[in-house]
Amino acid sequence: MPTSPESGKQPSSTQNNAPKPRTHWLVRALIWLFGLAVAGALALGMVIAVALAMAYPNLPDVSELADYRPKLPLRVYSAEGALIGEFGEERRTLTPIDEIPKVMVDAVLAIEDTRFFEHGGVDYKGMLRAALANLGKVKSQGASTITMQVARNVYLSTEKTYTRKIYEVLLTFKLEHLLTKEKILEIYMNQIFLGHRAYGFAAASEVYFGKPLKDVTVAEAAMLAGLPKAPSAYNPISNPKRARIRQLYIIERMEENGFITAEQARIAREEPLQLRNAGRSGGVNADYVAEMARQLVYAQYGDEAYTRGLNVYTTLNAGEQEVAYTALRKGIMDYERRQRYRGPEKFIALPSDKAALEDVIDDTLAQHPDNGDVLAAVVLQVANRSLTVQRPDGQTLVISGDGVKPVESGLSDKAAPNIKIRPGAVIRIIETSKGKWSATQLPEVEGAFVAIDPRTGAIRALVGGFDFQKNKFNHVTQAWRQPGSTFKPFIFSSALEKGLSPATLINDSPLVYGASVTGGQPWEPRNYDGKFEGPMTARTALAKSRNIPSIRVLDFTTPKFTQEWITRFGFDASRHPAYLTMALGAGSVTPMQMATAFSVFANGGYRINPWLIAKITDHKGRVLSEFTPKPLEQQERAIDARNAFVMNSMLQTVAKSGTAARAQATLKRPDLYGKTGTTNDAVDAWFAGYQPTLAAITWIGYDNPRNLGSRETGGGLSLPIWISFMQHALKDVPVASYPVPEGLTNMGGEWFFDEFIGSASVTSLGMDTGYRSPDEPTEAPPPEERNRILDLFRN
């Protein structure tokens, strides 16, 4: 019997016939399942690989991001560089990464992507952390990296599909491969939407805090860093409570990650934030100017004006603009306090629950936003001629004494239901100069103010109305109104060319033009006070703004000659019919036209054109266009230097002892010139005045013309606004005087054109008609004079 080679022994029969052990069915099942899983994974991997291979060529070209050029808005600035307006769908200030402060970068990394500089675009640890966070095991900052957010925000839609997620991951890898980490972070910091049309943190800093990004604190940076997740939910203006909670969390994250010390964190938590009103277009109240600039730039660049980051630098002086804005609004509100009370803006029911009450008041006042310093409030209580009102966030104020006088009629027991002030009434309040509060109402009257440099035409300040958001109609450039007595200087200017002098005697006595002369209703012009003062010099007549002497002057020069003469100042002849009513300012002008016209006197006789835009640059500061006005001596001469000098002398008397005497009395300087104006039935109130370096015009009136009040005049309404502005604008300006031109002679203290000395001069007007007191009956002019006047009206 053979033996085993190893042992040399024969195997037993039992060993040869024993059955082989069988694998347990569960093990086999697991092996099969594992095999299937591996095969499925391989198949899925192959499918994904094919999908990625097919998708990758279809990915957008991201190389253009190396030269990142987002949509940049049109920005309008004052001459000093103060932002006054911004236009475009997206507010954005393109800021290179090396100009973004470290505190802002740290705040963003702390909450959005702490490991940004460590991962390759997809943070697997972050994804694991997010998964554990879903199980409540750890805190999470989210699994979406900054690179993924850039891919999503720049190239992809917001739809949540597997396809979009695949493209997002692929784009992430592509971005990480082609761009540096610093470039990706720069794109993110400039591209992300942060609410209120602000894109990027530089724009958001201006929108929410009104300051450059380089100046933000840790607390402000943490507040801004909380916006990307949900700009509306964490908006510090509309949702301050939720924004505060997220800000504190980000400060905690910054401390945990070593970006700030414990002491810095403590200071940041305690720092009160000064939020600005996001409804304002800029730091300077110049909405009408910004809109004018926008229209001019759009006319040149079209739709590109809103996307290519143009910077428009205007001639506006920011300080003077603020003073003009404040002065006009104060003048209008002072007038409004003298008007009847028109009643509350709305009535609401007040809940008894305190929390519900605050919610209702806040919601109501959101529908009645503040208008500058004219604030909205809800009346809580009316008692003992005092009002208790509530502002948003529960702030309560008590108004009493003089503070309720403007609304006295609304507190009367006999007040009509729509007028009566009661709990639940929405009213307006304003803080007085004494630091107390007064009840008021939004004005119905409008106004305009414009100041230009008469030597160049540069617009220094312009306010087109009480409030741009309330009424976008620009009264400076668009409102055609009767100029009233402010037009008289141009009548007298034309007469100087005919031999009139400031010493010419003019009879302030009655004039009557019957129906046979006027072709319609008889006309018996009157002076403002209804009285006649008899003979007076032309200088006195203009200083006192007497109507009858002005009509006699126009009668002397003829309306036709004067109609042609006024075009030298920039007026439209067609808007000033050649009738004697031109002497009373019955034509139509705009405040801007008046500023241009009075500048002719101010600069010695030259016609200048007002201009606004000094320079336009692209977003990198490269100059695209620039305007420099020609020297004054190269401008068109409108009137002779002698004419301008004599008119300046007469208008100086107006500001010294005439209807505008308050000007020199307040400003205490002799180089002030101007003319008040109040139209028929006190519909328009004007003051047009200047100093040799600055001409300014003020107008007050209703859009639908109506009487301003029997006691309201240009000297009472508009002159105080002009004075307030000039107090600031002329503060450091030396007193100036005009040199005496050739061809003038001073005799007896008055100026005469050389060629009109002696028999050629006009010594008097209307003296042959005599003088009567206002109580004497009016007589029609003799037939020969009536025929002459009829001929004038026919011209």
Image (cartoon, helix red, strand yellow):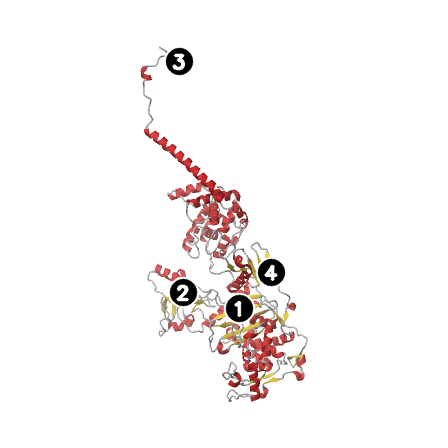
Q: Is 722 situated above or below 207?
A: below
Amino acid type, label 2: Ala
Can residue 260 be seen by looking at this rendering?
no
Mark carried by residue 626: 4
Q: Rounded to the nearest whole Å, what is the CA distance between mark 1 and mark 2?
A: 34 Å
Residue designated by label 2: 377
Question: Could you classify mark 2 by the number of other residues whose Cα lies within 10 Å: few (under 14), some (14-19), or many (20 or more)?
Answer: many
> Which secondary structure lies at badge 1?
helix
> Badges 3 and 1: C-beta atoms under 8 Å apart?
no
Q: Rounded to the nearest whole Å, what is the CA distance between mark 4 and mark 1?
A: 23 Å
Question: Could you classify mark 4 by the number of other residues whose Cα lies within 10 Å: few (under 14), some (14-19), or many (20 or more)?
Answer: few
Question: Could you classify mark 3 by the number of other residues whose Cα lies within 10 Å: few (under 14), some (14-19), or many (20 or more)?
Answer: few
> Which secondary structure lies at badge 3?
loop
Residue designated by label 3: 5
Amino acid type, label 4: Glu
Q: Position of residue 151 (x, y in %)?
A: 48, 47
**117 and 768: which is toward the camera:** 768
Which of marks 4 and 3 precedes in the sequence?
3
The quadrant of the picture occupied by the C terminus is bottom right
Which of marks 3 and 2 precedes in the sequence?
3
> Which secondary structure lies at badge 2?
strand
Residue designated by label 1: 477
**749 and 401: which is toward the camera:** 749
> Badges 3 and 4: C-beta atoms under 8 Å apart?
no
Q: Position of residue 772 (x, y in %)?
A: 54, 88
Q: Rounded to the nearest whole Å, what is the CA distance between mark 2 and mark 3?
A: 112 Å
> Which secondary structure lies at badge 4?
strand
Q: Rounded to the nearest whole Å, what is the CA distance between mark 3 and mark 1?
A: 121 Å
Q: Rounded to the nearest whole Å, what is the CA distance between mark 3 and mark 4?
A: 110 Å
Determine the residue positioned at 53% across, 68% down.
477
Which of marks 1 and 4 precedes in the sequence?
1
The quadrant of the picture occupied by the N terminus is top left
